[in-house]
Structure formats: structure tokens, C-alpha cells
Amino acid sequence: TRAETLAFISHDLRSPLAQVLARLGQRAPDVVEPLSRAHALAEDFLHASRAEMLDPARFEPLDLASLAHQAADDAWTAARDRSVTLERRLPDTPCWVNADFGLLHRALLNLLSNAIKHAPGHSRVDLALEAGPGVWRLSVSDHGAGIADDDRARLFAAGATLAAGARAGGAGLGLYFVRTVA
């Protein structure tokens, strides 16, 4: 299928790029930066194709609150570097769901990273997990400029980049990946 082919191609691109980046280190910064972008792009394609091939029969029970804490811990350095406070409103008790830990963690980390990147310096990003009737509601919010109404309709489409994403060299797969995992 298309997703499997994309996964194979992404994997075959990702491995040699990672090897070259490891060998170059800091010796050739003019080469490392475009190779790093290419490696990140291959990673994005690989994770998007894995999400598309997700098999709910392989889900395992996991504590969503613990996963959210781990994702927030993983995003902490980026928040600190941008002088953004990462505020958590997570329950102390386990919040059990059946899911794929790796993909769900990456999706939440993607949301946190986007919020941190687009939040004004010295502001706050909120991560909350609340119980609803038979469901958990996980949310990430920042206090940035927001998303233009014209962009909202295509926000989660594969390949969609907004002006800020295009400047960052994104492939438009981040929120597509999040939607696919969700």
C-alpha cells in the first residue's frame, strides 16, 4: 500500500542521513543544517505512515496522565529555552486508555512543541487532562496569536503548512500525524 511504501522509503532515507549527521558532527555546519531538515522530514513521513497503519488490536492499556507527564518533561527544555512556562493540570490518579504508547506520546509531544514554538516568550502553555462522560479530554493550549480562520479548515490535512510552518521548513505532517493518531 501507499503507507507501507512510504514507510520503507522513509526508513531507507532516515538511516543513511542519521549516519552522515553523526559522522559530520559540528565539522560542517553548512551541510549539517540541510541534512538535519531532511532527516526530520524522513522521520515525519515515517511516523505519519506508521500512524496510518495503526492497528487498534495491538493497543495496550496505558496511563494517559503518566504519558502526559512524560511528554511535558520531554518538552520542558524547549519551553525553558523560549522562556515559556509549561503548566500541567493532570490528575494524580491513573487515567487508563488502550493505545499505542509511542505514537500517542509523539502526538502529544508534537502538540506541546507547536504550542511552545508559537507561544510568545514569557507566556504559558497549558497541558490539561480532564474526565468526561466515559472519555478523557486531553488539551494543549498556548497564548499566541492563534490560527487564522481561513487556515483552520485545512489545519490537519497532510501537507498543509501555515505561514509559520513554511518558514520553519515543515512538511505539513505534524498535525496530520496528531489527527491520525487521535
Image: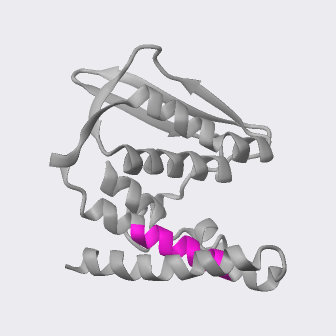
152 and 5: which is toward the camera: 5
Residue range corresponding to the magenta coloring: 35-46
Residue at the extreme left: 57
Q: Position of residue 172 (x, y in %)?
A: 48, 70
> Across the whole image, how many numbered discs are drawn on residues?
0
Q: Main secondary structure of the magenta part?
A: helix
Vertical arrangement, residue 125 with respect to residue 102, above or below: above
Left or right, 148 with reference to 83? left
Q: Position of residue 153 (x, y in %)?
A: 38, 61
Residue at coordinates 47% horizontally, 68% vertically from top-left?
A: 44
Q: Position of residue 147 (x, y in %)?
A: 54, 55
Where on the picture, by quarter, is residue 63? top left
113 and 56: which is toward the camera: 56
Vertical arrangement, residue 53 with respect to residue 12, above or below: above
Q: Quadrant of the N terminus?
A: bottom left
Residue at coordinates 32% horizontally, 63% vertically from top-left?
A: 50
Left or right, 1 with reference to 123? left
Left or right, 46 with reference to 148? left
What's the coloring here? one colour
Q: Position of residue 35 (x, y in %)?
A: 65, 81
147 and 90: which is toward the camera: 90
Q: Is residue 61 magenta?
A: no
Residue at coordinates 40% horizontally, 54% vertically from top-left?
A: 178
148 and 76: which is toward the camera: 76
Vertical arrangement, residue 104 with respect to residue 161, above or below: above
Res 1 seen here: yes
Where on the picture, by quarter, is residue 72? top right
Vertical arrangement, residue 145 with respect to residue 49, above or below: above
Residue at coordinates 60% horizontally, 50% vertically from top-left?
A: 113
Residue at the extreme right: 27
Res 171 seen here: no
